[in-house]
Image (cartoon, helix red, strand yellow):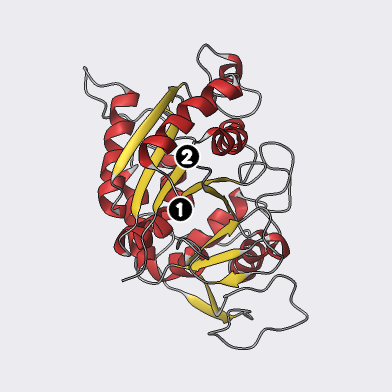
Amino acid sequence: MEDVSTIVFFHAHPDDEASQTSGTMTLASRRGHRVVCVYATNGDHGEVPDDLAADETLIDRRRREAAASARVTGTARIAWLDYADSGMTGWEENEGEDSFHVADTGEAAARLAAILDEEGADVLVTYDWHGGYGHPDHVKAHHVAHAAADLAASRPRLVESTLNRDHLRAVFAAAEALAPEDAPEAPTTDPEASVTHRDVSTTDPEGPAADPETPGSAHRQTVADAGGIATAARRMDVDGPADDGNPVGTPESEIHWAVALGDAVEAKRAALACHASQVTDIGMFLSIPPEHFAVVFGHEYFIEPGLAPGLRYAWPFDPTP
């Protein structure tokens, strides 16, 4: 059996673990690693579902959803830094009392470092420099995680979750080509929507040879559109300004690790479904039929500061990579 590690995933809000790292968390727990998920905020400025009970708050619901997601991924412990959700860039909540965005970075880092020390963390996973898409709480989490790693009694390896901009661009472009702007979108509740397939090149060493003329091609053997992928494409212009004015994610040339999820992509989808209160975002993800969801989200991507350039299709979370 391989050596096992304690891996702490630091996320801004409940549901971020599902969309960003839940497949990797599932694989880690299956391999015997101890998986811990720390949330910076309670997600209290997320969508408020219509079915909240009279004595139930949004925080109550989102904590229950986080616990359900943890059961899916095999997460051993959930911890909360207990800051308030800061909302999107420019919202008045950015400056609110207890907002994570305006929290003292050193204080927040000390809270996280205390958990790292309790756990004897070997690896700390956070976000890339702009949190994937510029959300103020994601950006803050990046800075807090780096500071916490420095404060920890034993400094963990620091790894940054990111989105592969080139992969998303290629998948979305193919989907858009198959579903013109004026074409009707598939119903979000219909998993049996008809599909059309299109081959796209790949640099996955286990797949067909890459097309050298296709920038950033990566493990895109088949792209399919059943309405859901095109809908996601229209909501997310990966090259346009995201929440902070920067493009979404990271160019493939700057990414170090691609984790192939295999059947853990089903756990990723199940973890997303646990956060059903967040209807708009979760509904967008789940509107993509499972087989096409696996094309878009079948890998999770990570940057490791200080590592030599080059994308590795490998498992990065053993004690010695």
Q: Which residue is mark 1?
A: 21
Q: Is residue 187 visible in the rendered structure shown here?
A: no
Q: Nearer the viewer, residue 219 or 291?
A: 219
The reply to whether discs 2 and 1 touch (Cβ–Cβ < 8 Å) is: yes
Task: Give the label on residue 242, or none.
Answer: none
Q: Give the answer, above or below, for where 90 lies relative to 141.
A: above
| Kind of residue at disc 1 | Thr
Asked which secondary structure carries label 2, the reply is strand
Q: Position of residue 10 (x, y in %)?
A: 47, 40
Residue at the limit of the structure toward the right, as seen here: 213
Q: Which residue is mark 2?
A: 11
Residue at the limit of the structure toward the bottom, as seen here: 208
Q: Position of residue 225 (x, y in %)?
A: 51, 69
Asked which secondary structure carries label 1, the reply is loop
* Left or right placement of residue 283 versus residue 238 in this view: left
> Residue 73 appears in which quarter of the rendering?
bottom left
Q: Specify few, some or many for label 1: CA neighbours under 10 Å numbering under 14, 14-19, or 20 or more.
A: many
> Residue shown at 55%/32% (left/top)?
151
Q: How many marks?
A: 2
